[in-house]
Image (cartoon, rainbow, N blue to C red):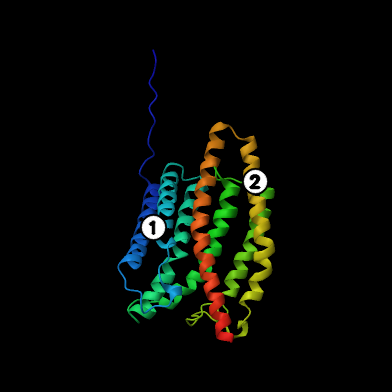
């Protein structure tokens, strides 16, 4: 007698509700970004606070990544990759949305939105958390949610240093120029560039390269199915990096031009 094997769907327990709420939160944030991009007249806001081409282009990748993350977090809650994908999608939104939120609350309708300055401060630190997760943590644990060995924890520790440096640099009162910094510390005035230069130039690329080396090892050791998963990961990461990296680079260039103009 041949028994038919049926795949049993996971129960609708805590992982399902947590993943579903996280995914719905991301949908709400994406809807807010679409509203700020298409339904607002930005002529009174400086160019730094206006929507860019990447304000909507990246939403497709974010939606796909968050949907896959939510499904994986529900079906395999012990696998850290699902929750990490959801976190990456969240901080990918925070690279752009807080900037639009601050622009709307400060320039378009001053005083209408609460904590607009805090939103712009969040915009200054979200990018390093996004790129650390996307370029270091995800390659280290994909696809089973575990490191190849405990020795790879050193790479995680290496990647944490630039994050701490950027968080410390965000305390510089000029870090959120032209807006006031809600967490500015006068003793750190003008030190933002000094604090983050070495960690970003040296440590972060080193951590990213080591994480990619881990991914290459998995690819060489893995079966055909795992290799296909790694190929899809590289496509998704590359797409999100192009969109978010282009927008962040454009904003950094604009802020650099503004600071040089202010000095003159």
Q: Position of residue 90 (x, y in %)?
A: 45, 59
Going from the N terminus, do you reach mark 1 or mark 2 first? 1
Most distant residue in the top direction: 1
> Which residue is labeled 1 in the image?
26
Could you tell me which quadrant the N terminus lies in? top left
Please tell me which residue lies in front, 176 or 83: 176
**Residue 255 vertical placement versus 86 (above, below):** below
Label 2: state its secondary structure.
Answer: helix
Question: Which of the 4 image quadrants contains residue 208?
Answer: bottom right
Please tell me which residue lies in front, 129 or 74: 129
Please tell me which residue lies in front, 149 or 194: 194
- At horizontal 54% and vertical 54% (from top left) the residue drawn is 134
Number of callouts: 2
Q: Position of residue 14 (x, y in %)?
A: 39, 49
In the displayed structure, does residue 151 sit left or right of residue 240? right
**Residue 82 vertical placement versus 5 (above, below):** below
Q: Position of residue 20 (x, y in %)?
A: 36, 51
- At horizontal 45% and vertical 56% (from top left) the residue drawn is 89
Packing grade of label 1 (10 A; few <14, some 14-19, many >=20) is many
In the displayed structure, does residue 5 sit left or right of residue 222? left
**Residue 168 vertical placement versus 64 (above, below):** below
Q: Are marks 1 and 2 in contact (CB under 8 Å)?
A: no
Question: Which of the 4 image quadrants contains residue 37?
Answer: bottom left
- At horizontal 48% and vertical 83% (from top left) the residue drawn is 180
Could you tell me which quadrant the C terminus lies in? bottom right
Residue 83's disc number: none
- At horizontal 51% and vertical 46% (from top left) the residue drawn is 235
> Which residue is labeled 2 in the image?
214
Label 1: state its secondary structure.
Answer: helix
Q: Position of residue 136 (x, y in %)?
A: 60, 54
């Amino acid at each position: 007698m041949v028994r038919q094997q049926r795949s049993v769907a996971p129960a609708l327990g805590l992982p399902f509700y947590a993943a579903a709420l996280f995914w719905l939160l991301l949908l709400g944030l994406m809807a807010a970004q679409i509203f700020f991009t298409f339904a607002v007249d930005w002529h009174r806001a400086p160019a730094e606070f206006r929507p860019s081409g990447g304000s909507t282009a990246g939403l497709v990748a974010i939606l796909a990544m968050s949907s896959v993350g939510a499904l994986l977090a529900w079906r395999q809650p012990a696998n850290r990759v699902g929750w990490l994908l959801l976190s990456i999608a969240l901080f990918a939104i925070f690279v752009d949305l807080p900037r639009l939120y601050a622009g709307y609350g400060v320039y378009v309708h001053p005083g209408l939105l609460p904590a607009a300055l805090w939103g712009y401060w969040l915009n200054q630190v979200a990018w390093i958390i996004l790129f650390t997760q996307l370029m270091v943590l995800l390659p280290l644990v994909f696809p089973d949610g575990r490191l190849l060995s405990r020795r790879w924890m050193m790479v995680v520790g290496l990647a944490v240093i630039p994050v701490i440096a950027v968080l410390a640099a965000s305390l510089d009162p000029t870090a959120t120029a032209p807006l006031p910094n809600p967490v500015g510390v006068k003793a750190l005035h003008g030190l933002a560039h000094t604090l983050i230069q070495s960690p970003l130039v040296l440590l972060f690329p080193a951590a990213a390269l080591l994480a990619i080396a881990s991914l290459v090892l998995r690819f060489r050791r893995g079966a055909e199915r795992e290799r296909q998963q790694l190929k899809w990961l590289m496509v998704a990461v590359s797409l999100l990096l192009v969109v978010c990296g282009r927008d962040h680079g454009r904003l950094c260039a604009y802020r650099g031009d503004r600071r040089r103009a202010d000095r003159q």
